[in-house]
Image (cartoon, rainbow, N blue to C red):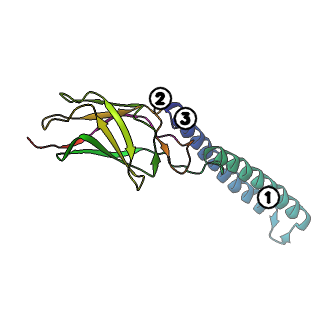
Amino acid sequence: MATDNSIKQAVGAVNRVNADIKTFTAAITADGKAINGKCSTTGLETGTVDSTVNTEIGKINAAVTAINSRIDVLFPASQANPTPLFIVSGVVEDAAATKIVLTLSEEGAITDETGFTISGCTSAASFSAAAIQTDKTVLHLTTNAAVDDDDVPVIAYNGATGNLVSYADSDDECITEAALAITNNVEA
């Protein structure tokens, strides 16, 4: 699950990888100058150049290994889905004013409405059910009362307490959504 703390850690790791890449680039530049310094106008000092080149290749390999290990921390091979599940949008239609229809970023799975809250409505104050549509990218939340035409519904989802997860990987929880404005198509 992506939390503020895990996002900060990922950004820090990316910054460290960028710093490694800058160090790596500077090392290659310095190594090139060192190798060029072993050349003379009368020809190469073969033994010295070979030794220098091998030493510098070893340094480059070590730098690449360090960068790769940092990238592996950010994007582990075991992570089936590096993009977290999130709620893309939501709408309530006139024909079904007790249903908030959410579009998900990928296929999802859910057992109940836990973690979801609603605000901005005169009557609808909570959710009583949740169900994933057959294609698994659309989630239906049933409200305890109909949304009125002049309501401005806003939903929130708490990823720490809710159970909306990726269909492909149940360990990939939906990220927390503090406030998602819902399109209200209910007519007067």
Nearer-the-camera pick, 155 or 113: 113
Q: Can residue 23 be seen in this view?
A: no
Horizontal relation, residue 154 to residue 54: left or right: left
Q: Which residue is drawn at 15% across and 35% down?
A: 148
- For disc 2, the marked residue is 161
Query: Identity of the amino acid at label 3?
Result: Ser
- Mark 2 lies on a secondary structure that is loop
Query: Identity of the amino acid at label 2?
Result: Thr
Q: Residue at x 17, y 34 (%)?
A: 151
Compare marks 2 and 3 and give the one earlier in the sequence. 3
Q: Residue 29 magenta-drawn?
A: no
Of badges 2 and 3, nearer the viewer stands 2
Residue 23: x %, y % from top left: 66, 47
Compare marks 3 and 1 and give the one earlier in the sequence. 3
Q: Residue 176 magenta-drawn?
A: yes
Nearer-the-camera pick, 142 or 3: 142
Cα distance, mark 3 to mark 1? 35 Å
- Mark 1 lies on a secondary structure that is helix
- Mark 3 lies on a secondary structure that is helix
Q: Are marks 2 and 3 in contact (CB under 8 Å)?
A: no
Query: The C terminus appears in which quarter of the rendering?
Result: top left
Q: Residue at x 15, y 43 (%)?
A: 186
Cα distance, mark 2 to mark 3? 17 Å
Residue 33: x %, y % from top left: 73, 58
Of badges 3 and 1, nearer the viewer stands 3
- For disc 3, the marked residue is 6
Residue 150: x %, y % from top left: 12, 35
- For disc 1, the marked residue is 57
Q: Is residue 64 visible?
A: yes
Query: Identity of the amino acid at label 1?
Result: Ile
Q: Provide the residue span drawn in magenta.
A: 173-182
Compare marks 1 and 2 and give the one earlier in the sequence. 1
